Amino acid sequence: MVIAGRLNMATGQPQRAEPGFRPVAVTPYRGNGLGRVVNWASYAVTAAAAGLGQPRPNLVYASSPHLLAGLSGWIVAAIRRTPFVLEIRDLWPRVLVDMGKLAESSLTYRVLERVELFLYRRARRVVIMAPGLRSVIEGKGVEPERIAFIPNAADPADFVPSAPRDELRRRYGFTRRTAVYAGAHGPANGLDLLLCAARAVPELDVVLVGSGVDKPRLQATAYDIHNVRFLDPVPKTEMPDILHAADVGVHVLADVELFRAGVSPNKVFDYMAAGLPIITNSPGVVGDLVAGAGSGYVVAPGNLAHGLGQVAQAGSAELAKLGAAGRQWIQHNQSRTAMSDALARLLASVVNETGEPRKSRTPDGSDLSCRAD
């Protein structure tokens, strides 16, 4: 059973309950102020209540885009006396300090750090998305054998377009060479850097797909950048069509040191699976991946204009070669099928080592997962 927030962050629409999926109410918010913190707290309360209302699971798996999601998972696991596994997607609260959103000396930071250490101590396993997080988490006192590296992934089979490329380009209004950014529009994403780069390369169109707290401000900033366009969020099922219509996929992050070792961006793997060449301004783990796979252009954090310029000048054969290399790499090294199998083996080992009975599962036969989506 997956327990997630009722609002789908990709589409902005409410999510419906389905077999194996339980959406829970959360408070609305705008921006990154107190309302967002209340939203996190509301999810922790409603997710914990929903988890406690399920039959006793074999295991609780909590993903931590924020730490209160992990805390709600631990509460359910502790009360139901079942193993707890924590997934670390962002290194909270350190990332807030590195982005300048929180002072390390503040009470809020000290409280969040205590929650972080509390969860690390109580998790049977800590799953990390990026290899650079291992040394950081070991430094927090987590034994190496309790840390498992299982990154995000994508399957090329999930990115088959519904129509020919020319038809899709007409559908989305792509009339020139087009770079697509598909993802969240938040402070961490560094999209101001992309807007500045687009202004410097007017011969290339840039389309941003998605939503987030910074989107209204970004739209206002880009009012006079005539080669920039914003699209509303689309369902995941439509993403293969948008990526197939585009010429390159853009991955951009704010220039934060932690991001060089501590990220595993879904959009990069989606671009690869779709056979789309990539521009990234993120050195370190992402840049090394793109360069190693031969799937795109890696530029300095503040030099996205150079990457966009390379795409504008590249021949179609060069772009096709880069896209094919990325697709081949993801298929052979980091497919969703392979990563799902690795996670399944890990969870089975946790259940087996604790002697938990396999008969006490949720109605759909799955383990309980808390996700703050």
Image (spheres, grey):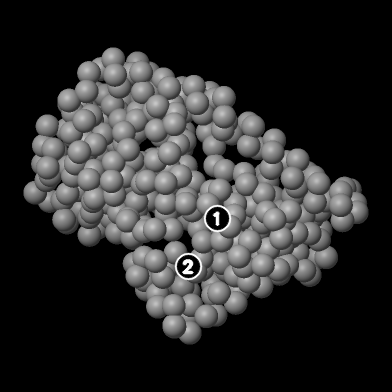
Q: Whole-percent x and y of residue 68?
A: 57, 68
Q: Residues within 10 Å of mark 2 (few under 14, many from 20)?
A: some
Q: Which residue is mark 2?
A: 94
**Secondary structure of residue under mark 1:** helix
Q: Which residue is mark 1?
A: 133
Among the 4 quarters of the image, the one containing residue 309: top left
Q: Count the marks.
A: 2
Question: Which residue occupies 48% across, 84% down?
Answer: 107
Q: Which is nearer the eye, 39 or 132?
A: 132
Q: Whole-percent x and y of residue 142?
A: 68, 63
Q: Is residue 311 left or right of residue 129?
A: left
Q: Is residue 161 above or below residue 339?
A: above
Q: Is residue 158 left or right of residue 239?
A: right
Question: Which residue occupies 36% across, 23% down?
Answer: 322
**Secondary structure of residue under mark 2:** helix
Q: Is residue 159 above or below residue 122?
A: above
Q: Amino acid at mark 1?
A: Leu
Mark 1 or mark 2: which comes first in sequence? 2
Q: Whole-percent x and y of residue 246?
A: 30, 28
